[in-house]
Image (tube, helix red, strand yellow):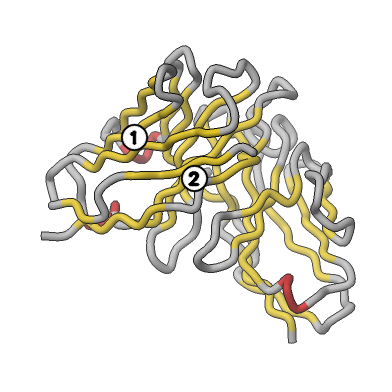
Amino acid sequence: QSVLPQPPSTSGTPGQRVTISCSGSRSNIGRSPVNWYQHLPGTAPKLLIYSNNQRPSGVPDRFSGSVSGTSGSLAISGLQSEDEADYYCAVWDDGLNGYVFGSGTKVTVL
Amino acid sequence: QLQLRESGPGLVTPSETLSLTCTVSGDSISSNIYYWGWIRQPPGKGLEWIGCIYHSGTTYYNPSLKSRATMSVDTSKNQFSLTLSSAIAADTALYYCARDNILTGFHDSFDIWGQGIKVTVSS
């Protein structure tokens, strides 16, 4: 897999919970830790989740990550207007011997 | 505070070599728990991993770049670089350098990113 499939877009109202899926394979998700990034136009991507479900210092606990089999998920609870951004998963692929990124999901806050 | 900064020409002629440098400040590029990577984003598209390098010179590259990519590291200057030979219009992108954390023993995540540099390949 050169790109991990993600839903192109999702949306929610303030306070709602949204989830984003990331579909992998046995050569990546399940063997290596999944990470998630928030990307706002014109800025550097920001690490949200590492090691499947760990948050770096400063990332609100509204963001959570999980892995089940060969799929990863990012959940955003208590959606806020500043969460409107593009979100990408990424994982090391043992077959490719390199990172693969997800196709990206645009989150819109209605 | 760790910072990464990309530098290089913003315009490259097709078939020429695209060359970028990432300067690391606030930490040593020779740390044993980090690789250093390049990622790019073409206009209107998603993120694409280009490659990673360790301070020893060990490298990993995206196979899709078909050997056009070469990375190097200069520990004396705390810098690492990317060259992309035979540049084509499809190489037009926002290029980011980033730190690849391997503290867990895996290539875990890019935890620190530069602000990015826009490179256009055009005559």
The nearer-to-camera label among 2 and 1 is: 1
For residue B116, side relative to residue A85 (left or right): left
Question: Which picture quadrant has residue B111?
Answer: top right
**Residue assigned mark 1:** B82
For residue B59, side relative to residue B11 (left or right): right
For residue B38, side relative to residue B7 (left or right): right
For badge 2, the amino acid type reads Ser
Q: What is the x, y in percent for residue A68?
A: 83, 45
Q: Tell me which chain the residue with mark 1 is part of.
A: B
Q: What is the x, y in percent for residue B57?
A: 42, 16
Q: Residue at x 52, y 23 (%)?
A: B29
Q: Is B30 situated above or below A84?
A: above
Q: Residue at x 62, y 16 (%)?
A: B32
Q: Is B8 situated above or below B94?
A: above
Q: Residues within 10 Å of mark 2 (few under 14, many from 20)?
A: some
Q: Which mark is residue A2?
A: 2
Is A24 in front, or is A73? A73
Is A102 in front, or is B105? B105
Q: Residues within 10 Å of mark 1 (few under 14, many from 20)?
A: many
| Label pair 2/1, CB-CB below 8 angstroms | no
Is A5 in front, or is B14? B14
Q: Tell me which chain the residue with mark 2 is part of.
A: A
Q: What is the x, y in percent for residue B69?
A: 31, 34
Q: Residue at x 70, y 32 (%)?
A: A32
Q: Residue at x 51, y 40 (%)?
A: B4
For badge 1, the amino acid type reads Leu
Is B95 in front, or is A31? B95
Question: Which picture quadrant has residue A91?
Answer: top right
**Of helix, strand and loop, which one carries label 2?**
loop
